[in-house]
Amino acid sequence: MVLPHKLILASGSPRRLELLRQAGIEPDHLLPTDVDETPRRAEHPRTLARRLSREKAEAARKALKGDPQWPNRFILSADTVVARGRRVLDKTELVNEASSALYMLSGRTHRVYTGVCLVTPNDALRQKVVETRVRFKRLSRMEVESYLASGEWRDKAGGYAIQGLAGAFVAKLVGSYSNVVGLPLLETVNLLTGEGYDVHAGWLEPERSAVQ
């Protein structure tokens, strides 16, 4: 008897969960992982995204080791990095951090990298890094102050969320929009499909039960 594949999302991001659901994929379990996201010295943003996505996947794999509940599981993890040149823009916790980030991005092009990592049921590891270029319009002081007052910048890399009010700041985008939100759907679905996960099962069945 062949057991059906299960999908574990090693992330607590509601945006990544929403994107997967948009593609008709409902994870069977959510397993957020806690890893040190500090960049290494001279580490390129692309390399950082790749490394952190792998570390998150490996942390989830370690947490599930020997658990008989998940004998035939895929583990999916991701990490998104916003960078201006080689400078990584962290998640903003304070208003002055968000203000600095927005003025740094104003009128300029920055890059968003998302590392996606998949651990297969036979413990093979597959990775992909997707890059999107985003150019902001030149922001006025009123626009920055109004956006700061909205609170959308909290806990957002680069101090903004493209799927919210900051979408009005984007003058040009080259690449994947969902990548900037937090998970490149095309590449993620291709990764899952290529390893034998049936991404279309949820398109044909009634709504699956809520994640555990």
Image (cartoon, rainbow, N blue to C red):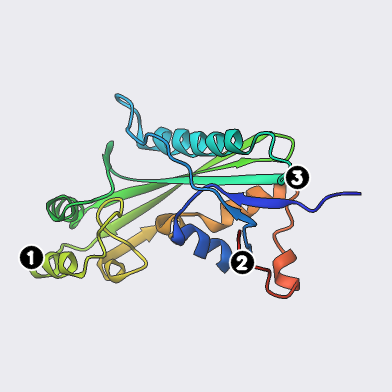
Q: Nearer the viewer, mark 2 or mark 3?
A: 2
Asked if residue 92 shows in the view, the reply is: yes
Please name the residue that numbered disc 3 is placed on. Answer: 72
Name the spot of residue 169 as percent of width and height, x first: 25, 66
Q: Which one is earlier in the sequence, the residue at label 2 or at label 3?
A: 3
Disc 2 and disc 3: Cα gap in Å? Answer: 19 Å
Asked if residue 85 shows in the view, the reply is: no
Disc 3 and disc 1: Cα gap in Å? Answer: 53 Å
Q: Which one is earlier in the sequence, the residue at label 1 or at label 2?
A: 1
Q: Give the structural element (helix, strand or loop) at label 3.
A: loop
Q: Nearer the viewer, mark 1 or mark 2?
A: 2
Amino acid type assigned to the residue bearing label 3 in the image: Asn
Please name the residue that numbered disc 1 is placed on. Answer: 141
Amino acid type assigned to the residue bearing label 1 in the image: Arg
Amino acid type assigned to the residue bearing label 2 in the image: Ala
Name the spot of residue 107 as percent of width and height, x first: 18, 57
The numbered dot on residue 210 is 2
Q: Nearer the viewer, mark 3 or mark 1?
A: 3
Residue 74 located left or right of residue 111: right
Q: Which one is earlier in the sequence, the residue at label 3 or at label 1?
A: 3
User: Dot 1, crowdedness within 10 Å: few (<14), some or many (≥20)?
Assistant: few
Nearer-the-camera pick, 138 or 180: 180
Q: Residue 156 is drawn in which quadrant?
A: bottom left
Q: Residue furthest top?
A: 41
